Image: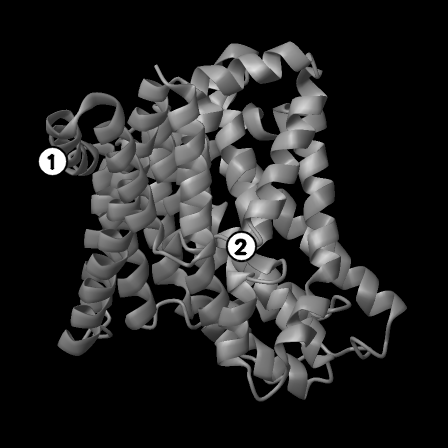
Amino acid sequence: MNVAVGLIGLAVLLLLLALQVPIAVALILVSFCGIWYMLGLAPAIGILSATPYEFVASWTLSAIPMFLLMGFVTYHAGLTTGLFDAAKVVVRRVPGGLGLAAIFACTGFAAVSGSSLACAATMGRIAIPEMVRAGYKPSFSAGILAAGGTVGALIPPSILMIVYGVFAETSVTKVFLGGISVGILTAASYCLVIILVALLRKDIIPARAGEDGQLDARGVLRDIVPLIVLILLVFGGMFGGIFTATEAGAIGAAGAIVIAVILRRLSWPAFRRALFETLGTCAALFIVGAGAVMLTRFLGLSGVAGFINEFFSGLDIGYFGLMAVIVLLYLVIGMFLEPFGAMLITLPILMPLLATQGIDRVWFGVLLVKLLEVGMITPPLGMNVFVIRSVAAEHVSLAGIFRGALLFILADIVVIAAMILWPDLVMFLPDILG
């Protein structure tokens, strides 16, 4: 073992990331060179040639392209376009009704997309112009959608949670179940922020700005029935024990295609776009995952993982001290890295530490996804904010969106604190149904 080589490798990795070298390239390059130095060229080439196949060949990972295809098909077939109108019917007379409808629509879209960025972009394009026309302050409207998009990675089928389950060797279904309660709690905290702003700051949300008497309640609710049927089919079967998460992905993708074809909403160009977007997303994700597996092997061979574990054990900082370090780590790293990269770079270092501290991997997976999603709306590189900027550039500036998301970041901090203080908020569904 050579701890010095491992630590130098981590330093070089951070330097490459700071120089904006692609994450996958940085991970593979550092790991390959480190193993080459320690063991020789032949073992390094052997690990480099075997690792991508060993990672991608995981049966559980096959759920990712299936769930992605389900989300892209429902989006391009227009099955999700009625979510915002349907949500308005339910909450239009509540203070801040349009903002609440946006959060509800994001939560509904999350159940078929699994992507924070897709959720923010799709709902932002629909909801922000309408909120601005109703008198909402543009920056706050954009902040609602940037924050609402983060629910997309918490509500199943979360792609982040699937990757975590594979990497941490834990049940994806249980992590999904934990994500449901935290996703709902997050959405509820955002709704509370919107209601309080509507009651206290009429300059941000005008009185009665959520009402719309022109909506045909029965018609808009009827439009989302196919989507509800698809969600119940996939998650009812998965959480009811009828099929696994991987099988649920395949059934969801097939169900989305069948429903879209029956409704005559899926043209060949739309299906082709959905297919190519699925392939592109999977390729980008899997190459980063293969690099992360190589980094895990490099750190294990160098002894860095054991060194870090012994270091924190010697500090005797306790559960809350360790959680404070982890939360601070991810809040900072989330400002500069996208979630997949941040997760896969840090897990090889943290997993041995979590095992010795007796921290439940299901609970930590949900906490990790929540922490990474906060980074999606924090400056300077909050990706959801940039996505919202791209779809609402005529309404608000980038700085305005960051300001509009500030109250929702504070709500996220409260939710994270609650998860740490009361782990049963996350674990009660996995314990009952898992």
Residue 336 is labelled as: 2
> What label sits on residue 49 in the rendered view?
1
Is 177 placed above or below 261 here?
above
Is disc 2 in contact with disc 1, using a CB cutoff of under 8 Å?
no
For residue 313, which quarter of the picture?
top right
Q: Amino acid at mark 2?
A: Phe
Q: Residue at x 89, y 67 (%)?
A: 200
Residue 336 at x, y = what percent? 53, 54
Q: Residue at x 53, y 52 (%)?
A: 151
Say above or below: 46 vs 140: above
User: Would residue 122 be visible to someone looking at this image?
Assistant: yes
Looking at the picture, how far across and down is residue 15, in whole percent?
45, 48
Would residue 404 be found to the left or right of residue 46 on screen?
right
From the image, which quarter does the C terminus lie in?
top left
Residue farthest toward the right in the current orientation of the protein? 200
Dot 1 surroundings within 10 Å: few (below 14), some, or many (20 or more)? few
The x, y position of residue 129, in whole percent, is 58, 84
> Label 1 amino acid?
Ser
